[in-house]
Amino acid sequence: MEPDLQETCAFLIHYLDRLLYGFDRLDAVVDSSDGGIEKAFHLDAIYNYIAAFLLLDAKKQPPGGSAHSALDRHGKASLLDELRAVIDQPLDGATFGEVVLWFRNQALVHPGHGDADVDKVYAKVNMLDPQVADQFREGLMEVRRLSRGLAEELLVLGGMQIGRASCRERG
């Protein structure tokens, strides 16, 4: 039996809470001189959550991601349109979403545990170019902003109060 709309909304909000938590924790360590490991950990989590939520299995079920199929069964997939626009933004001959997947796949999920992992990504997109790196960071921040907004929309759609299912309410 398929989950009803309220259940779907609650689980998607919980998922978005974890993504937003990663962003919030990243803020706390980004300026720290000893935050290298924590920064990498939270970025890894963010890439994984974005990929699973919006990108994975696109060949089997376009446009990909667990959120699309969850919302589509309730006729609400259009709630993802703004996030999809960010995912599809051009970035140095690729898209923002492709770059997230490349980092996730090469460095996290299927690593060779060497410099070649990152080199493979950099061969596809020049992250050493400050303009490209800035565009990528802006894409991440836009995903963050839109994810917070989506969580709030899902609260209303699911008829929930913040105590029932919450969304991170920072910044």
Image (cartoon, helix red, strand yellow):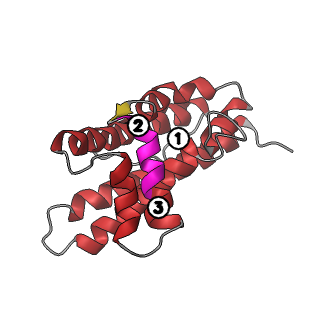
Left or right, 62 with respect to 110, comes to: right
Please tell me whether residue 98 belongs to the stretch shown in magenta.
yes
Q: Earlier in the sequence, mark 2 or mark 1?
A: 2
The numbered mark at residue 106 is 3
The residue that mark 2 highlights is 94
- Provide residue 124's location: percent of width, then percent of height: 38, 47
What type is the residue that disc 3 sits on?
Gln
Residue underneath mark 1? 161
Disc 2, SS: strand
Predominant SS of the magenta segment:
helix
Q: Of the residues under marks 1 and 3, which one precedes in the sequence?
A: 3
Q: Mark number for residue 92?
A: none
Magenta stretch holds residue 14: no
Residue segment shown in magenta: 93-103
- Residue at 48% of width from left, 50% of height from top? 101
Residue at the spot x=72%, y=29% of the render?
74
Quadrant in the rendering for residue 68: top right
Which comes sooner in the sequence, label 3 or label 2? 2
Which quadrant holds residue 139? top left
Q: CA distance from mark 2 to mark 1?
A: 40 Å
Q: Quadrant of residue 22?
A: bottom left
